[in-house]
Structure formats: C-alpha cells, structure tokens
Amino acid sequence: MKFNDALWGAAPLLLAGVILVQVQSFPRIPGQNVGPGIVPGSIAAGLGLCGGVLVWRGVHARLREGAAPWVYVPDWMRSWPHAVAFCVLAAANLFYLLAADRLGFILTGSIYLAAIMAVLRVHVVRAAVIAIAMTLIIHYAFYKLLRVPLPWGVLQSVAW
C-alpha cells in the first residue's frame, strides 16, 4: 500500500506540534538561557520541518500529476501469499509484545523468527536452527555486550 507523501508528512508534523506545545510547560532554570526543553524542542522542530517538506511534496505531486490517489493498493497486495505473509508478520509482532515477558526473549524470539521464516518457505529444520542461533546471538549482543535487561521469562532459573 502506498500512501501519498502528504499523508505520511502529516503525522510527524502533528507530532512535532504536540511536542513543541508540551516542552513549553518544562520548568525554566534560573540564570540559564536554555532549559530542559531545548533538545526535545530542537528535535521536534527538525521533525516538523521534515513533515512539512513531505506534505508540500505530496500536495505538489498530486497537483502536478492530476487526480493521483491518496492511497494506492498495488496488485501484489491482492495476492493470497502476500496477504498471509503480512498477517503472519503482524501476528508475530503482536505475539512478541504479549509473550516476551512471560516466555522470555530467547523463546519468544526463536518462535518469532521461525514463524517469519516459515512464511518465507525456509525448510523447517533450517528455520529452527537459524531462529535459535540468531536469537542466542542477538541475546548475547544485547544482554552481555550492551547490558540491555532482556526478559528471561520461564528460563529465569538458567539465566547466565
């Protein structure tokens, strides 16, 4: 599905406006020219600028090309295998969000990757081996090297 740039640009433009309004309520620091809202305000201004450019490009392209649709659904999105793959990807993301704390990162990540590889028609044994290996590598990189506290879930008793 392809959305016109004006639609994509409206979201960051709106978010930037909300952030800029919110940072006005941050407390001022006495004797300082800049306060705690300078960084989020600057980022919001850049985000708003990018959103504004997208809106301008989208509206300009629509005027130039005539009645181009705001939303375009290409033919490949109407095919059954692509629809199933999209649904599996959405379900895998939802599964991760709901199950990661209970099952833990290693089990959830392995199931997540195996499901996505199954949709991509990877052989079952190969998908299982790759899913487990990649999940362990990712876990090691984030948990040990970057010290990100990933959930252990049911594997809490074997935590390294």
Image: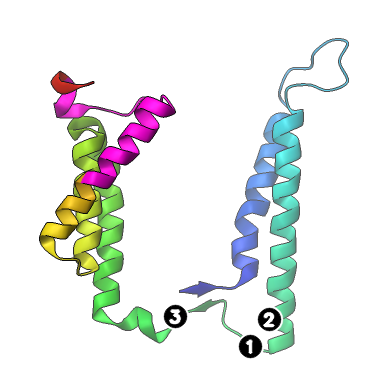
Please state the horizontal and vertical placement of residue 138, each as a whole percent of the image.
Answer: 34, 40
SS for tag 1? Answer: loop
Distance from the alpha carbon under mark 2 to that under mark 3: 16 Å
* For marks 1 and 2 on the same chain, the one whose residue lies earlier in the sequence: 2
Q: Nearer the viewer, mark 3 or mark 1?
A: 3
Q: What amino acid does circle 1 point to?
A: Ala
Distance from the alpha carbon under mark 1 to that under mark 2: 6 Å
| Residue 104 located left or right of residue 14 | left
Q: What amino acid does circle 3 point to?
A: Val
Dominant secondary-structure state across the stretch colored magenta = helix
Residue 120 is labelled as none
In the picture of the structure, the residue carrying the numbered disc 2 is: 62
SS for tag 2? Answer: helix
Distance from the alpha carbon under mark 3 to that under mark 1: 15 Å
SS for tag 3? Answer: loop
Start-end of magenta stretch: 133-156
In the picture of the structure, the residue carrying the numbered disc 1 is: 67
Residue 156 vs residue 124, the one in the foreground = 124
